Each structure stands twice: as C-alpha cells, then as structure tokens.
Image (cartoon, grey):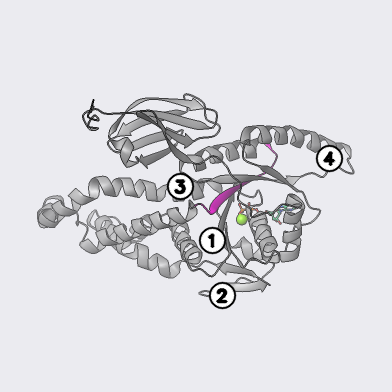
Amino acid sequence: MRTLLFTGKGGVGKTTIAAGTAARAAQDGHKTLVLSTDPAHSLSDALGIPEPAYGQGPIEIAPNLWSLHVDVRDRFTKAWGEIQRYLLDVLDSAGVDPIEAEELTVLPGAEEVLALLEVRDQVRSGSWDVVILDCAPTAETLRLLALPDALRWYMDRIWPTERRVLGVLRPILRRASGVPMPRDQVLDAIERLHEDLSDVRSVLTADDASVRLVTTPEAVVFAEARRTLTSLALYGYRVDGIVVNRVFPLTGADEWRAKWITAQAIQLARIEADCDPVPVVKAAYQPAEPVGPTALADLVTAVYGDEDPIAIHQVPDPLTVTRKGEDFQLGISLPLVVKGDVDVARRGDELMVTVGAHRRMLSLPSALRRCDIRGAHLEPGRLLVDFTPDPAQFPRKVNRD
Ligand SMILES: Nc1ncnc2c1ncn2[C@@H]1O[C@H](COP(=O)(O)OP(=O)(O)OP(=O)(O)O)[C@@H](O)[C@H]1O
Ligand SMILES: [Mg+2]
C-alpha cells in the first residue's frame, strides 16, 4: 500500500501531476485510486471524464485506474451538525440574526477536512495498492492537516476538567451567563471529530505515505514552496519529492523563449540547492493541456524516465530521538529555516515549536518528559533539542561496588 499526496501553490499543476502519477501507476499494474479534496473537481476535467453523480463511488476510467469524487454532504451533517447546532444556539442567545448565524457557523475548510476522512477510509479499505490525493492549494491544506494537533492540545488540556465541571455547573452557568452550555452530545461530537482527524493524520504520516510538492521554476512560486516545505516538515509530513512543472524545453529557442529558459535555469539551480536531499524532478511545458489518462501518464513517464514514479525516497526522518550517554537529543526535520525563525518552548509534556506563523505542539516521548531542556540549536535542515535527565525524576542507578 502506498499513499501519495500532491500539494503546491494554486495553478502550478497539482491535479495534472497527481492524475498523471496515478495513470502511470495504473499502467504499471497497481490498482490505483486518485481522489481530490478540492471542491472544484478539476480532477474529472484533467482525466477527461464527466463529473460523477452525487453519491457515486469510485469509478474505473482505465484498467486499474479509479477516480473518486469525494462528496462530503453526508459526512458533513454527521460530523459537524451537532457542533453547528450548538453554535447556532449560542449565537441565537447572543441576539445574532439567524441567517447571519448560519453563515458564521460554516467553518471555512471544514468540508475539506471531512474529505480527508474519506481518504482515510479508502486507504484502510484494503482495496487499493496506491491511493493518490490531489490536495487543495498549499495554505489551506496545511492548516487543515495541522488541525488534529491543535484540537488534541485543546482537548488534553481543557477537556477533562471542563467536562467534569460542566456536568455540575451547567444549569448555574446557563442562568448566570445566559449562554447555553454545550450538551454532552456536542462534547461527544467534538471528541469524535478529533479522533477521526488524528486517525487521518496517522494515515497521512505513515511510513508508506509521502508528500510531493509541485512548483514551477519561478521565484515567486518557489518562495511559497519553500515555506510549505518547512511547514510540512514541522507538522511531521515526509516530503520525498519536488516536481518542478512547466519547464520550457531547450529546443527551438526564439528570443522570448531564450529569456524564459535562462530565468528558469537560475530558479532550477536554486530549487535543487535548497531542497537537497529531497530529489527534484522536472516536467516539461507541453504544447497542449495534458488531458486524459494516456496524455497524463506520458507526461509523468517523461519526468521519471526509468525510475518508478511512486517509489518512496528515503529522506531524513521527520522526528528522531538519539541517546547521547545519559542525555537525549530530539531531532526535528526543519528544512530552510535559519536561527531567529524558530522558537522552542517547553509546556509541560509538550514541546511548542514555532516557525513564522506555524506552530506545532509536539507531544514529548515518555523518556523525554522526565528530562530538562539543556539547549537547542539548528543544523542545516534540522532542529536539535538537547535533553538531560532531571535527577528528581530519574532515580540514580545504585552503585553496587
Ligand atoms: N506541464 C504542463 N504543460 C502544459 N499544461 C499544463 C502542464 N501542467 C499543467 N498544465 C495545465 O495547466 C492548468 C492548471 O493545471 P492544474 O489544474 O493541474 O493545476 P492545479 O495546481 O491543480 O490548480 P488548482 O490550484 O486550481 O487546483 C491546466 O489547464 C493544465 O492542463
Ligand atoms: Mg487542482
């Protein structure tokens, strides 16, 4: 079983490369499912098939190649409905107009989160050799992928107490504040959502899963890809390939094209240097839009030559713990960051790592929970945090001599 995610800035060719990789994997004899969490459904357009009807399961579009239109309406009502009804109550008691309230409780991006549940179910179904996911543009996907972390932090910290307290105080609080307190069903719904999302995360960060980042050889586009590379690593996702799309072929150069070729060559060199050790491959700008399984598979075959496009590339582990005598060192893969970009702080059993606007609450492995942080430093591509055992929590070995 192999899971591949494709992400990148809007319009760079994510859907094209994801569908092409799926079409090629199918040609190689792998039973392959390609699905998109993007509500725009341009996946069907790229594959050259009509938009599937609502509720239709996976459809076979070529031998071994299946595509799925993820429709989240049912899931949406189940997973989010209870929470939404509660929020509507709260807003109603605060005097917000019901129509406005309805709009306020539509979580942007919630649909895509729920589409990820479908991805998990498909990966776990045992029906596929390869599942390929065409994700929505960068920022959106990232935020959503980080959601289980954020929710877990909140639930571990606040939930148990809040839940206990709520049972006793609900009627009093309601009278005092005039705001309805969440009922048990609401708390249950949030807990279920959290469990589901953690489950999705574990599927997407499993050893047989990796992310491919699609970019074009342009400074502005690559600047965003760099940030995505860092934040994906921060959240523990393994990026095992960069696909540079729309590279101008070197033949038949007129002056206009020659200028583009020179500009792209500069960016390509930068991309290769910056992304090392992650392999970088190039997809040529085609003279026409690649549409349909054959054209898409041909594009991807030209990219990888004799290599298997779905082979997983070994890249440094997102998270490592190494023993150094009595001490430990925690390593977190963080490409392209420099000192000053990163902030590390300990919060109880968690390590809070902040890079720019992104933050991860990392649950410390149990051995490290009984340690103090001695310091942290950056190596190229990696943040290293030194831990030393806290004598109060690690009983010293008894010297038998
Ligand atoms: N290598 C290529 N050569 C020629 N056309 C391409 C190439 N890659 C993608 N395209 C075309 O560019 C357009 C955008 O590609 P695509 O839909 O794959 O991008 P995307 O990153 O998925 O966009 P979105 O962010 O909107 O989902 C499509 O018309 C596609 O056919
Ligand atoms: Mg797309």
Quarter of the render that holds ligand 2 = bottom right
- Image height of 96 relative to 60, above or below: above
Residue 39's tag is 1
Residue where numbered disc 2 is placed:
53
- Residue 379 screen position, x and y as percent: 51, 27
Q: Within 10 angstroms of label 4, few (less than 14), some, or many (20 or more) residues?
A: some
Q: CA distance from mark 1 to mark 4?
A: 35 Å
Q: CA distance from mark 2 to mark 3?
A: 29 Å
Image quadrant in which you'd find residue 39: bottom right
Element under label 1? loop
For the C terminus, which image quadrant? top left
Q: Which comes sooner in the sequence, label 1 or label 3?
A: 1
User: Pointers 4 and 2 in contact (CB under 8 A)?
Assistant: no
Q: Within 10 angstroms of label 3, few (less than 14), some, or many (20 or more) residues?
A: some
What residue lies at 37% left-to-right and 40% top-to-bottom?
A: 362
Residue 257's tag is 4
**Callout 2 amino acid:** Ala
Q: Is residue 94 magenta?
A: no
Q: Is 314 in front, or is 39?
A: 314
Q: CA distance from mark 1 to mark 3?
A: 17 Å
Q: Which comes sooner in the sequence, label 3 or label 4?
A: 3
Residue where numbered disc 3 is placed:
143
- Residue 129 screen position, x and y as percent: 58, 64
Q: Which comes sooner in the sequence, label 1 or label 4?
A: 1
**Callout 4 amino acid:** Arg
Answer with left or right where residue 230 lies relative to residue 160: right
Q: Which comes sooner in the sequence, label 4 or label 2?
A: 2
Element under label 4? helix
Element under label 2? loop
Disc 1 residue: CB within 8 Å of ligand 1: no
Q: Which residues are magenta?
A: 207-218
